[in-house]
Image (cartoon, rainbow, N blue to C red):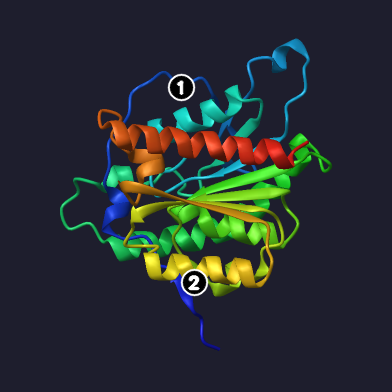
Amino acid sequence: MTVNVLAQAPGDDCCKGVKHTGEPKGTIEKIGGLDTYIATPPYLAAGQPAKGVILFYADNFGPLFINNKLIQDYFADQGFIVVGIDYFLGDPIETHLNEAGFDWPAWLSKSESQSREYEPKWYEAIKKRFGQETKYTAIGYCFGAPFVCEAGASGKMVAGAVAHPGSLDESHFRNINVPLLLSCAEEDHTFSTEFRRRAEGILVEDKKVYHLQVFGGVKHGFAVRGDPNVENERWAKEECARTTVEWFKRFSK
């Protein structure tokens, strides 16, 4: 059977970008045997309920990368419990950026294989901890995008979002049955204009609930590793996070 790939596998641009600064507020705990970043709303301690739980599927840098921690903290400040799975098992791409002779294809293959093995067990542990009836949403950046689309096809969540996605084929868009937000870069080696338009065509053809936004003047990775000292990159990153959390609020009522 022919697989029509729309978003390519992560490549060189998935290792580039700017490391941010800030003071993370979340904690790291073992859930389902995996390190998990947990960010909670500030009012949770006062007994007020969260709006829901966001499953955070990180890019190649993993959920424990400072940029991703700060994004998760932002989502928590908006009223959600956020859980970020370390499906890289403590071996994100960041640890290899200056490594001579680094075997990128081997790392990627290993990471894809182990993430597929461990994510289902992690998700079951998440449900056990936070409740079967809780409203779950999911965000996936690059490497994490397939987990969102597949969760949206299997009833794991009420809404999903992807930003500069990687490793998606036509079936991911055909099979998703929950509202999907796509935040895309104008220039993206992984999700080109041609294939982005093809993906949108499928969503229109199949009458899916979706919203697609394209940010001009930015490249793949902008939503996590954009340069905060460049006004347009900072705005695009912040607006992507804002629209993502508003999308989740809309469907978590």
- Asked if 106 appears above or below 170 in the picture, the reply is above
Secondary structure, mark 1, is loop
* Whether residue 28 is visible: no
User: Please, which residue is most extreme toward the left here?
Assistant: 100
The Cα atoms of the two marked residues, 2 and 1, are separated by: 38 Å
Q: Name the image quarter holding the C terminus.
A: top right
Q: Is residue 67 above or below residue 140?
A: above
Whichever of labels 2 and 1 marks the residue nearer the N terminus, that label is: 1
| Residue that lies at the very extreme toward the bottom in this rendered image | 1
Q: Amino acid at mark 1?
A: Pro
Residue under the point 47% across and 61% down: 112
Q: Relative to residue 103, is residue 247 depicted above or below?
A: above
Coordinates of residue 117 in the picture (x, y in percent) = 58, 60
Q: For numbered disc 2, what is the local secondary structure?
A: helix
In the image, which disc is placed on residue 194? none
- Residue at image position (45%, 49%) is 88
Name the residue at 47% across, 39% down: 240
Mark 2 or mark 1, whichever is nearer to me:
2
- The percent position of residue 49, horizontal first and vertical second, equals 77, 23
Residue 35 to residue 214: above or below: above
Where residue 30 appears, x then y in whole percent? 60, 35
Q: Amino acid at mark 2?
A: Arg
Mark linked to residue 198: 2
Q: Which residue carries the number 1 mark?
A: 24
The residue carrying pointer 2 sits among few (fewer than 14), some (14 to 19) or many (20 or more) residues within 10 Å by Cα, namely some
Question: Residue 162 placed where, x, y %?
Answer: 52, 51
Horizontally, is 146 left or right of 237 in the view? right
Task: Say whether residue 62 is left or right of residue 179.
Answer: left
